[in-house]
Image (tube, rainbow, N blue to C red):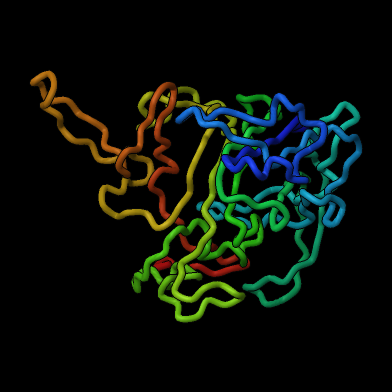
Amino acid sequence: MKSPATTLSLFSTVATMATSSWIDEDTPEALRTTKSLVDGSTYHLVMSDEFNVPDRTFTDGHDPTWTALDKSDDDYSASGGGSLHFYNSSMVSTTPDGMLTIQSILEDTSWTHLDLVKKEQVTKTTHFKSGMIQSWNKFCFTGGIIEVDVILPGEPDIGGLWPAMWLLGNLGRATYEASTNNLWPWSYDKCDRKKQDSQSISACNKANHFGLNKEQGRGATEIDILELMAGDSGGALPATEPPIMLPYADLTLQVAPGIAENRPQSGSQPVRSVDHSHSGYATSVAENWYDNLTVAGNTSLNPFFYGTYLGPTKKNEPVTRSKKQ
């Protein structure tokens, strides 16, 4: 199964950065600016990759912008099941016709690692290979507009694949759980003793090591530009308005800490209130968890993600996070 991407572009409002060496020389001049859909302001290109050079490889050290992983994916789901694949950099390349391609294939990978529960070296085997490509610690930015041109893999009504394009704060590195535990998805710069144990780089800390400022809270938030949830749900999913069903595209901001007031229960929409102000009749109005959050068009709050807590780690995960944390 292949997932080709044809181009990636990043725009900033800072025009002086437009001559940055991060811009692909094959990006047309006409595509080096874009307009904000919010206020109409002009954004200037600061980074792009057309992926049109054939046979590029992305093994660690091969490319100045990207790194394809060679490691297991140790993340465990809430139900305790781990990922079924092994990330292999050979699954990521560019094609002769100018596309970045990420493959998923049926092939065994066996490796030996330290089992933190058994305290011994064990051998594990997965039956699928796939790819992940990252710009971690190579190209970073603080804001702007991102444009990605992709062709998604597979059939939309057949589950199993989870293609995604997403951003993560550079203090954490995706799939390296020791770097993200109690750091993802924090964005908090106040000292709260009740939350201090849950945030590794807390504003309560009198010393934050590795050159970080003391008494300054830091974290690694996540923005999912697009995640494809494939499959066939056989109808609308519960508690969605307007109704959504598999397959659907999911776009998320993952951030901590959440505000406890009006926090929705997992699988439920936020608290609803009664409105008498317009028609004189009592109507049920959905309240959003956060002020000024709007949902429009063929879009629904996803009650299976919205408002959920990050659960404790499972016993086989390489890091530990308690229920309290």
Closest to the observer, 202 or 16:
16
At x 70%, y 35%, the residue is: 8
Q: Is residue 50 left or right of residue 190?
A: right
Q: Is residue 172 left or right of residue 291?
A: right
Q: Which quadrant of the rendered structure holds the N terminus?
A: top right
Question: Where is residue 314 drawn, in percent x and y?
Answer: 54, 63
Question: Where is residue 323 drawn, in percent x and y?
Answer: 42, 66
At x 32%, y 54%, the residue is: 259
Query: Vertical placement of 199 versus 52: above or below?
Result: below
Please tell me in which quadrant of the rendered image residue 117 appears: bottom right
Q: Is residue 207 left or right of residue 20?
A: left
Residue occupying the far left of the picture: 280
Closest to the observer, 242 or 203:
203
Closest to the observer, 178 or 316:
178
Q: Is residue 161 left or right of residue 29?
A: left
Q: Which quadrant of the rendered structure holds the C terminus?
A: bottom left
Report if residue 227 is visible in the image.
no
Question: Where is residue 197 drawn, in percent x and y?
Answer: 43, 72
Closest to the observer, 209 or 22:
22
Please tell me in which quadrant of the rendered image residue 238 appears: top left
Report if residue 264 is visible in the image.
yes
Query: Vertical placement of 145 versus 201: above or below?
Result: above
